Image: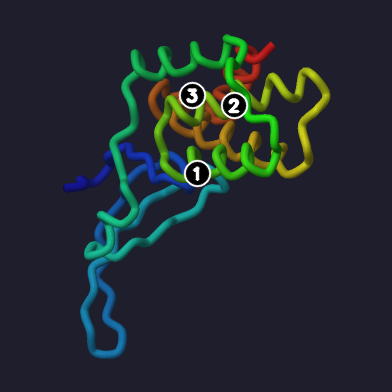
Amino acid sequence: MLINGQKIFVPNYGAGVMNKVKDNKSYDINKNYVSIFILIDSIDLYIPESKLSDYKIRPIENKENLNKALEIIKFTPQNLEKKWSKRYKENNDKIKGGNLFEMCEVIRDLYYLKSKGTLPPGERKILNKAENMVGSEISLAFDIKIEDALIKIRKLGK
């Protein structure tokens, strides 16, 4: 169960803070909504309590796990998919899954392609999304600005 002020990660949206449960009545039906302030784009996400399990919400990772995940970015990728369309789908699925370690793999792989000058425009968007997702989690865990978290990630990819 989510508690007020809890730092959480919502796959496909990023890290945020659970604010409150709001009671809303529409069409004579009472529904309770959970409000989550998402760091990326500073949005409030309202999710019906009955649908929370569909979102695969998890607590943010601790600093130790975050540091382990960030180490992945430093290495050269091994078995990189050659076809960009298949790679795009696989990377998109990893981001939607919300697994921190897989998102760091996406960043590592796309940084590698970027350094070789072979990063297609569609994958630039994927890279940006993955950076923001991981950056938002770092921001909450280390209590730093999201911009500083992104700088930390990008330094690892050099």
Quarter location, residue 82: top right
Mark 1: secondary structure: helix
The dot on residue 107 is 2
Q: Residue at x 24, y 74 (%)?
A: 31
Cα distance between the residues tagged 1 and 3: 28 Å
Cα distance between the residues tagged 3 and 2: 20 Å
Return the disc, 2 or 1, that comes first in the chain's sequence.
Answer: 1
The colour scheme of the drawn protein is rainbow
Q: Residue at x 42, y 29 (%)?
A: 100
Give the answer, above or below, for where 124 lies relative to 56. above
Cα distance between the residues tagged 2 and 1: 13 Å
Residue wearing tag 1: 93
Return the disc, 1 or 3, that comes first in the chain's sequence.
Answer: 1
Q: Position of residue 67 (x, y in %)?
A: 42, 13
Q: Position of residue 69 (x, y in %)?
A: 44, 18
Q: Decide if residue 25 is on the left or right side of residue 114.
A: left
**Closer-to-camera residue (43/92):** 92
